[in-house]
Amino acid sequence: MFTTTVCAALSAAGLAIALLTAYRRRFLRATKIAALSLLPVGLAMAGLVKLFGKVGKATGDWATDLVFKPTVWAGFGVLAIAVVLWVIARIASGRAPTRKERKAAKAAARRPAAEPGASAPAIAPAAKPAGKSSAAGSGSGEDFSDIEAILKKHGI
């Protein structure tokens, strides 16, 4: 009951400030202030203020237990051991090959890298296009001269 009254008073004060702001012809700011001032009443009507209060009380109780109860510290120790064991297991599983990887490695070892009678590679290296090799050397100078002309034009 008291919480709802406080929320209603906060909203009323916010709406009064919004009206004063609107009186000064700052309508956009007044709209924002009105929207924010309606939040306390909306939270109280929805029951979220009580929920936040319960969450805050539960968090405070837990923090008090954390400081004064050794079983809570022991619980954190158990959690730390669990995390360390999990990390060790992940590292160990990352280094050990799986069953599928071992089968693939055995199959690759059985196959020869090249056929016994083959002397040349199966894929020939790509040939250079005839027109591109001579154009690349002479064309690049022209490109730079165009760029130099543009830079000189702008005084750079």
Image (spheres, rainbow, N blue to C red):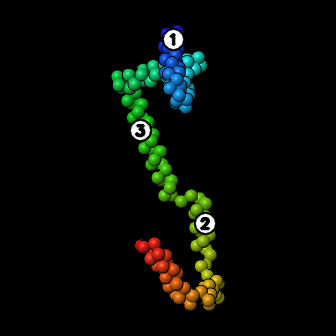
Q: Residue tagged by mark 3?
A: 80
Query: In the rendered image, which quarter contains the C terminus?
Result: bottom left
Q: Position of residue 26 (x, y in %)?
A: 52, 30
Residue type at mark 2: give it.
Ala
Residue 104's mark?
Answer: 2
Q: Which of the two discs, 3 and 2, sits closer to the camera?
A: 3
Q: Residues within 10 Å of mark 1 (few under 14, many from 20)?
A: few
Cα–Cα gap, marks 1 and 3: 46 Å
* Whether residue 101 is situated above or below residue 124 in the rendered picture: above
The answer to whether marks 2 and 1 mark residues whose Cβ atoms lie closer than 8 Å is no
Q: Secondary structure at mark 2?
A: helix
* Label located before the other in sequence (1 or 3): 1
Foreground of the two, 25 or 108: 25
* Label located before the other in sequence (3 or 2): 3
Q: Residues within 10 Å of mark 3 (few under 14, many from 20)?
A: few
Residue type at mark 3: give it.
Ala
Q: Which of the two discs, 2 and 1, sits closer to the camera?
A: 1
* Whether residue 11 is situated above or below residue 91 in the rendered picture: above
Residue type at mark 1: give it.
Thr
> Residue at (56%, 90%) from the top-left corner?
134
For the question of whether residue 33 can be seen, the reply is no
What is the total number of numbered labels drawn onto the structure image? 3
